[in-house]
Image: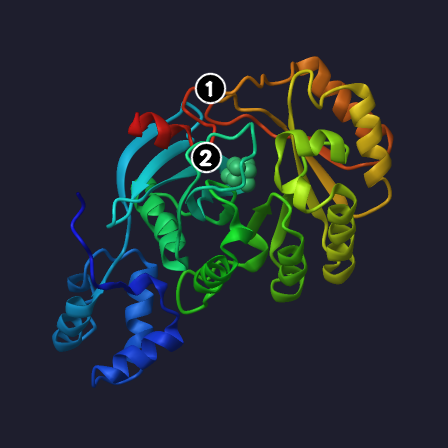
Amino acid sequence: MQEAEVRKNILNFTPGELGDIVTGLGEQKFRAAQVFGWLSKGAASYDEMTNVPKSLREKLEAEYSIGLPEAVRTQEAKDGTVKCLFRFMDGTEVESVFMKYEYGNSICISSQSGCRMGCTFCASTMEGLDRSLTGGEMLGQVLAMRKLTGSDIGHVVIMGMGEPFDNYEEVSRFIRLIHESKGYGLGLRNITVSTCGIIPKIRAFAADFPQVNLAVSLHAPNQEIRQMSMPVAKKYSYDDLLEACREYTEITGRRITFEYAVIDGFNDSAACAEELAGRLKGWLTHVNLIPLNEVEGRSYKTANGNSVKRFKDILEKNGVAVTVRRTLGKDIDAACGQLRRRHAG
Ligand code: SF4
């Protein structure tokens, strides 16, 4: 049993909310910016906040925890990818992955522990949803990973465990927290949110965060194939999803990324590629072909290199922008949700 934590996590609060907290404790409002600045630097205790009066530090300590997660398991791949199983105070565990790219360091964070979306190729959903994370807990993953790796992180992708749009309010809070100029100050264009296709939230996101990148897990060229592996497709049809995505590009003027995990004998044929190209030709999209990370207990196999190349060539021939995602962390449990399952098992 984990120790029950009754204090609130101070990482969840914006500078404005911290201002109310600080004044409520009888201190001056400007102290809130100091506290927020320390938290964004990754301070793990109030004692580190040397320019904050001791009286305020003690009052905060009594009521608010600094909810940085603890790294309970870490795997490092030869290419520098670091995968970490983080545990929060209540025992909830999630995975985050640090990756090195030519353009800089990136982290993929989780928005929920587990997931209730039920995609059949995914390890994160095998035990359903444990709980959603708060915005502060998402921020905590970035801060803890930065400390763990000793590296700056300039890009954040919300594509780990969970469906971000099943936790829209807290994902929104996270984006505001990490973008806050008094804190981490991450540019909105350096943030990507990946959804399995919850249409009403795609529309809300276009209005709320037009500068944040959106990726949609498509994984199929049509409704029939999509609904075989993604139950969400039964609620939101393929046609409606593409229409919402097209609207998104028109409203935001931004390219949308479609994630496509290439699965052997399932969605990797030339006919699938032709059909997808026909759907996407002529609009602001980018297709990211992902060699599937095979998951224990699932029968899907990753497509071989030849069919991935054929798929890419057909999209290109039709003028659809496409890349094949570099496979990072091959020698570790890179498929999301696997580290948590192994650790539990
Ligand atoms: S792929 Fe994403 S949305 Fe689907 S079950 Fe896994 S974590 Fe959930």
Q: Report the front residue among 155 and 16.
A: 16
Which structural element holds mark 1?
loop
Residue 237 visible in the current orientation: yes
- Relative to 258, say whether 179 is above or below: below
Q: Say what amino acid the circle numbered 2 marks.
A: Ser
- Relative to 344, say whether 237 is above or below: below
Quadrant (top left, top right, bottom left, bottom right) of the C terminus:
top left
The residue at which mark 2 appears reads as: 124
Outermost residue toward the front?
234
Q: Report the front residue among 54 and 165.
A: 165
The residue at which mark 1 appears reads as: 297
Please provide percent x and percent y for residue 68.
28, 52
Quadrant (top left, top right, bottom left, bottom right) of the N terminus:
top left
Q: CA distance from mark 1 to mark 2?
A: 12 Å
**Label 2, residues with CA under 10 Å away: few <14, some 14-19, many ≥20:** many
Q: Is mark 2 within 8 Å of ligand 1?
A: yes
Q: Which residue does the image show at 43% across and 63% down from the upper left?
A: 177
